[in-house]
Image (spheres, rainbow, N blue to C red):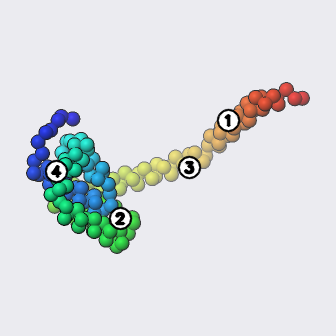
Amino acid sequence: MERKDQWSNDDDLILAETVLEHIRFDSTQLKAFNEVGERLERTPAACGFRWNSEVRKKYKTEIKEAEIQRLENKKTKPRTASRSSLAVIETPQRLPVPLEQISNLIIKMERTIEQLRKENQVLKQQLNDRPDVVLSEDFKNMLRIIQKARELGLDRIS
């Protein structure tokens, strides 16, 4: 990754919005730094350093508000809702990709998930249809028992 020394106001804004979003939805700042790092082509460490040395100081009020919102979210939102799914609903104008592309991607991912589920069922069935796999595990266990008996000298008893 090429070194970038200058942070623009837009970079700082992206960093701040992303970190605040992660705070709101009970995620970690490290995840935010990773996300911003990918987006801005910087290391997560550089993002963390910039946040802690410069940007955080400018957003004290927003951080407190995000922490309050996080507590409210914990009380009112179901546990199954993820930070990212709530963020898409709440802030679609910040998305770097058009919403239509995201919708298409979600549909494609749902198809892939369904395909993988079917494949998983087929593989499980194939595994159940192969008693030799179970027998080979039993065979391994039997060999371990025989080896242990040899170590104890029990193979010499007649």
Residue type, mark 3 in image: Gln
Q: Earlier in the sequence, mark 1 or mark 2?
A: 2
Position of 98 compared to 24: left or right?
left
Residue 1: % across, % down: 21, 35
Residue type, mark 2 in image: Ala
- Per the model, the C-alpha gap separating discs 4 and 1 is 60 Å
Q: Are marks 4 and 3 in contact (CB under 8 Å)?
A: no
Position of 137 compared to 85: left or right?
right
Residue type, mark 1 in image: Lys
Q: Earlier in the sequence, mark 4 or mark 3?
A: 4
Tell me: residue 114, above or below residue 66: above
Q: Name the residue beneath numbered marker 3.
A: 125
Instruction: Look at 25% across and 60% down and name the residue there.
Output: 21
The disc label shown at residue 54, or none: 4
- Per the model, the C-alpha gap separating discs 1 and 2 is 45 Å
Mark 1: give few (<14), some (14-19) or many (20+) Cα within 10 Å: few
Instruction: Look at 19% across and 55% down and name the residue there.
Output: 56
The disc label shown at residue 45, or none: none
Q: Earlier in the sequence, mark 1 or mark 3?
A: 3
Say what secondary structure mark 4 lies in: helix
Give whichever of 37, 51 is nearer the camera: 51
Q: Which one is closest to the eye, mark 1 or mark 3?
A: 1
Instruction: Look at 28% across and 65% down and name the residue there.
Output: 67
Q: Name the residue beneath numbered marker 1.
A: 140
Q: Name the residue beneath numbered marker 2.
A: 81
Say what secondary structure mark 2 lies in: loop
Say what secondary structure mark 3 lies in: helix
Residue type, mark 4 in image: Glu
Q: Hey, which residue is sitting farthest bottom in the picture?
A: 76
Q: Earlier in the sequence, mark 4 or mark 2?
A: 4
